[in-house]
Amino acid sequence: MTAKDARVLIVDDEEKIRSILAAVLAAEGYATATARDGIEALERATVFHPDVMIVDLQMPRMDGIETIVRCKERFPHVPAVILTAHGSIQSAVEAIRKGAYDYLTKPFDNEQLLMVVRRAAELAELSGEVRRLKERLEPRRGLGAILGDGALMQDVRAQIRKMASADATVLITGESGTGKELAARAIHAESARRLGPMVVVDCTALPEQLVESAFFGHEKGAFTDATEQTTGAFGEADGGTVFLDEIGDLPPGAQAKLLRVIQEREFSRVGSARPLRVDVRVIAATNKDLESRVRAGSFREDLFYRLNVLTLRMPPLREHTEDIPAYAVHFASAFSGVFGRTLTGISDDALRALQARPWKGNVRELANVIQRGLLNAAGARIESVDLGIAPAGGSPAGWSPAEGLEAYVQSVTEQTERKVILEMLGRTGWNRTLTAQNLRISRKTLFNKMQLYGLEEPAGD
């Protein structure tokens, strides 16, 4: 869509006004559709897909301001121009506060009308370009951040797509480090709220006496040190998503207040009795068993059922070890850029060692191990010895009992040999001749072994 071929929906209860507006706009090349009131406008907009709306302020059944509010809920990116015969500043300010882009008074000047519509159309075009750009980038920050091609992670991504379109409350469960926040961000990024804010609240980091203020904000002077008004997480997330991380740690007193805002979609700031409406989707996450906490009386049963509308379980890494190579390569590439290192990859032995671990810390622990391996790596790739992890069951990394004793001895020898050569190279400042002399091997043998183990002098040393 360009501003010149924008689609304009005209909403007015006077047929003559609708006809005049349509004729003026059509003469400038705009496609137009008309509706007699707000209810009909909602129906027409669903089919016509307007880029701009012109809405009369005073109409039967549904006035202009309510029409704009209702249309904004379904079509948040469509600018609306309010049209009024009364021209009062109060009505104009109220209309703009409720989401109108601009306003015109009857009788309107054709040139002024065209100027306002043109600007609104340009805004719609610019918003569309920004939205398309965000959508192109979104896979990297949203669903594209959920890695893994195994069956479990494919199912997780499929569930996220479904949950994103439902706009219902979601409870994400899983052990620490499984990527619950990434999943929450993916749900938000794939949803109709993706252009709205996503506000994260870590429930474990909130002192009980500050939970209500963190959630809902406070008025100036509401308590000691309240020197200014604050919005709170739910106010900041209006039109978007609030993510409550580790909801199982929320104090009992705050659970009742959270239940109310989920049920009523309204809250009051600390120090105020005035209720504020909010349009927020709630996504919560926990590594606790909330059902057992409900039975123990430490978590409200009614809040649990409000949160547990849609449930997503993030599986522990040990349940999808086939995805470990993809995670490892991803983290190695990401950390290489951070530390200014150039890697050609990760050795097969190192990958086998990674897949043999239980990963109690899940993906987060894996990321830390890869970071350590990158910093330890002397060559162009990460080797198993660089990872700093103990071999599973006391056996050397990459060795399987089915391979026999000879393979065991060879694996131990290679890992030890690589470590000794690397240490000696470090002591001699990567002087090959001196290293070969100290190890009592020829320079040719040293070069062959350095090539075999991927040992290269770090850049800048």
Image (cartoon, rainbow, N blue to C red):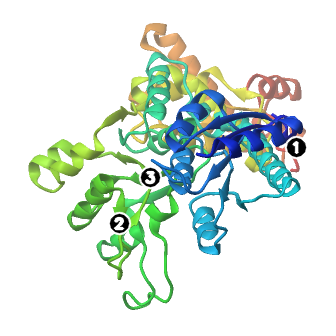
CB atoms at circles 2 and 3 under 8 Å apart?
no
Query: Residue flagged by tag 3: what amino acid is it?
Result: Val
Disc 2: which residue: 267
Query: Residue flagged by tag 1: what amino acid is it?
Result: Asn
Query: Residue flagged by tag 2: what amino acid is it?
Result: Phe
Q: Nearer the viewer, residue 327 or 259?
A: 259
Q: Nearer the viewer, residue 344 or 291?
A: 291
Label annotation for residue 109: none
Disc 1: which residue: 431
On the rendered structure, is 42 left or right of 249? right
Residue 143 at x, y = what percent? 57, 32
Against 85, is 186 above or below?
above
Looking at the rendered structure, the secondary structure element under dot 3 is loop
Residue 362 appears in the rendering: yes
The quarter holding residue 99 reads bottom right
Residue 238 at x, y = what percent? 50, 57
**Sequence-first tag of 1 and 3:** 3
Estimate the spatial distance between the alpha carbons at disc 1 and disc 3, rounded to whole Å.
63 Å
Looking at the rendered structure, the secondary structure element under dot 2 is strand
Residue 49 at x, y = what percent? 65, 32
Estimate the spatial distance between the alpha carbons at disc 2 and disc 3, rounded to whole Å.
12 Å
Disc 3: which residue: 280
Against 274, is 304 above or below?
above
